[in-house]
Amino acid sequence: MTRFNELLKHAVLLFGALIVIVPFYQMVSYSLKSPAEIERGIGGFAGSQALMTDEQCVGRNTPDRSDVETARTRFPGQDDSHVLGQLLEEVRAECQVRPAVFNYTSAFSEAPLLCYLLNGVIVTLSIFVIQVVVALPAAYALSKLRFWGREAVFGMVLFCLLIPVHAIALPIYVGLAKLGLINTYAALVVPWTISVFGIFLMRQFFMTVPDDLVDAARMDGMGELAIVWRVMLPTAVPALMAFAIFSVVAHWNDYFWPRMVVTGDRSLFTPPLGLREFKADIDGSLYGPMMATATVIVTPLIAAFLLAQRKFIEGITLSGMK
Amino acid sequence: MAEVKITDLRKSFGDTQILKGIELKVADGEFVSLVGPSGCGKSTLLRIIAGLEQESAGSISIGTEPVSGIRAADRNLSMVFQSYALYPHLTVAENIAVPLRMRQMTRWQRLPLAGGLMPGAKRREQEIAAAVAQAAETLEIGALLDRKPGELSGGQRQRVALGRALVRAPAAFLLDEPLSNLDAKLRVHTRTEIAELHRELGATFIYVTHDQVEAMTMSDRIAVMMGGEILQCAPPQKVYADPDDLRVAEFIGSPKINVLPAEADAMGRLSVLGRDLPIAVRPGRQTLQIGLRPETLHLARGDAKIVGRVVHLEHLGSELFAQVAVEGLQGRLVLRAAPAQAAALQIGSEAGLDFDPASALVFDAAGMRVREILTAPAKSLAQAV
């Protein structure tokens, strides 16, 4: 019976894991396959990787009159249309690529993906750093200092957790527009710098830090701000990592807000906006390069998570204080 | 090094009075223990001295300076906490160096990386490292300097916490139950060490504990606190032998003092359990209590003042404690006997107890000590009949 229960548990978990993983599988698979394979849904995970013709490459290099003139010597005694045909064959032969290479190179060449990635790094890091600079002292005050109205302030923090961002997006947009900040990094960063979630999370963590530690720091001659940065910050590393994951993932993947405040200036695009470059136009949707872009965008997050995971679990134990 | 003077100190949280007018003067270089049961306000008093808690009324001065309103960091005191409160992310050496770094280096010199380039930073760092090494040597923790607190045992952490306190020379050391997280054996050992350390440094120590043995063994003077007041502040021997208050007598001493109800007749003559004693108090009181330390009771050779039955024996090797149930008494009497007397004390056997009336501590009904003890006047013939 227990054996059956174990099996059942694993089956349910596996099913859940599959639901999560299938879209990722599809994304990576599409990023490797040729358009024909994608359309017909064949080729398994990686496709056959048979050579395909890069039509855009052909389009760029289509031979014109002068090419025919210069090439005439190579094809003595043939008329122009024949020469043109021969040249076209050569161009097509040169534009043969493997589908995976095609998808990833066009991801980087058709859109300035590196620039978008850099923007993503600048924006998410700025947001996270400022959030920490704001949230840590606030959380310290809310957990370790006694002042009139503390509970009321904390109540307001909790209340702010309930406000959905989309509800206040428009007023914030108008405010930023009035300040002339639309199409700047500031517009991407400023609205997110005060994270009530961060304040709440850090406050809950600081509640578990013994008061004696704070008192010891005071006896050792630290001011309140020194206590925040020299004592609370280092002990809060595990909680900060958790918060970092929430914050960085949310803002790296955010499509809604950058789409609102970055209008037109492509040098400010964040990675998710880069995906739009491959949306359907005359050529039809280029799913391969689009999924290659998506893969490139999520890779840093997954890598960062895997690196942070160890730190996450190890943390700094508070055992030194007991 | 400085004296600490506390005048009419009061503290209340809302309507609850925690401290009710504390008066205490700790002389320069003195070791004073604040001892009392939990909730008596001793830790609050220490925290107010430290500046971690604000007094409601009254004043404190350290040296000649009144310190009201001065924050903890600026009072020049060192404190050792019950939980040690070491910085978990710093090594032992860094932990010990913190008070010096915070006080002797400028904000710029303390900056990570860049701080080392500031003028004078290197020399300061060297001085601090030397001071840390010396403190570590005093406490014999030199081998642990590179470890993190999480890798240390309780006793080692306690030493590091002491090291952090004594790495500089503050006006006074405050210790808040520093031994209560140690196991019994280590506690006895560290007790001696702290007392020796105090003698060596000649510094002012204020030591909070709920353990009367710690207070007795280490202090120059003990301040026994109860209910937010200091009941008595005196050297250990005096607190033990000559308590002002029954609560002090009961708190100090292990096993606890025996308390017997006593009556005084119209002439002031005392009697216990119906037996007359050759001592008297001033007439006017009727019900009194007398306290008898276990060592003042002994097995009666002839006529016993108190007769009871032995119900429990505790052999401690060097001595023997017998609990004796006496009819008419609620608690049991505890008697200290020499191991040689073990044969006379069998569980269930009857024991006749006697004591020297002069060693009895007499308290009035409210528990205040009655010091004026007279020789009982001879009973008149009429009364005797």
Image (spheres, coloured by chain):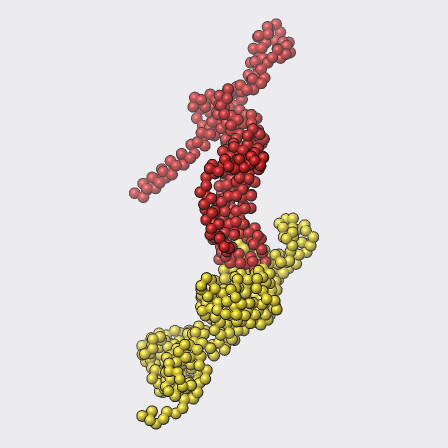
Q: Which quarter shows the C terminus of chain B?
A: bottom left
Q: From the viewer's perspective, tell me whether residue A207 is left or right of residue A265.
A: left
Q: Residue furthest front?
A: A178
Q: Nearer the viewer, residue A213 or A107?
A: A213
Is residue B332 among the parts visible in the rendering?
yes
Name the foreground residue: A218 vs B143.
A218
Q: Is residue B189 left or right of residue B116?
A: left
Viewer-side residue, A162 vs A25: A162
Image location (x, y in percent) of residue B361: 43, 80
Among all residues in the image, which is located at the extreme right? B119
The residue sitting at the bottom extreme is B381
Identified at 51% across, 49% down, the residue is A139
Which residue is found at the position 62% from the left and 7% from the top? A76
> Would residue B310 be seen by someone viewing this image from the given angle?
no
Position of B299 relative to B135 (above/below): below
Q: Which chain is yellow?
A: B
Q: In the rendered image of this protein, which colour is used for chain A?
A: red
How many dots with numbers?
0
Q: In front here: A181 or A212? A: A181
Where residue B335 sits, quadrant-wise, is bottom left
Q: Measured along the vertical axis of the image, is residue B124 above or below residue B253?
A: above
Residue B122: x %, y % from top left: 67, 54
In the rendered image, which quarter contains the N terminus of chain B? bottom right
Q: Position of residue B74 (x, y in %)?
A: 60, 61
Please, is residue B341 above or below residue A118 in the view?
below
**Which of the 4 quarters of the picture holds residue B254?**
bottom left
- Residue at horizontal 62 percent and vertical 58 percent from the top: B103
Residue drawn 56% across the image and 25% down it: A110
Q: Position of residue B301 (x, y in %)?
A: 37, 86
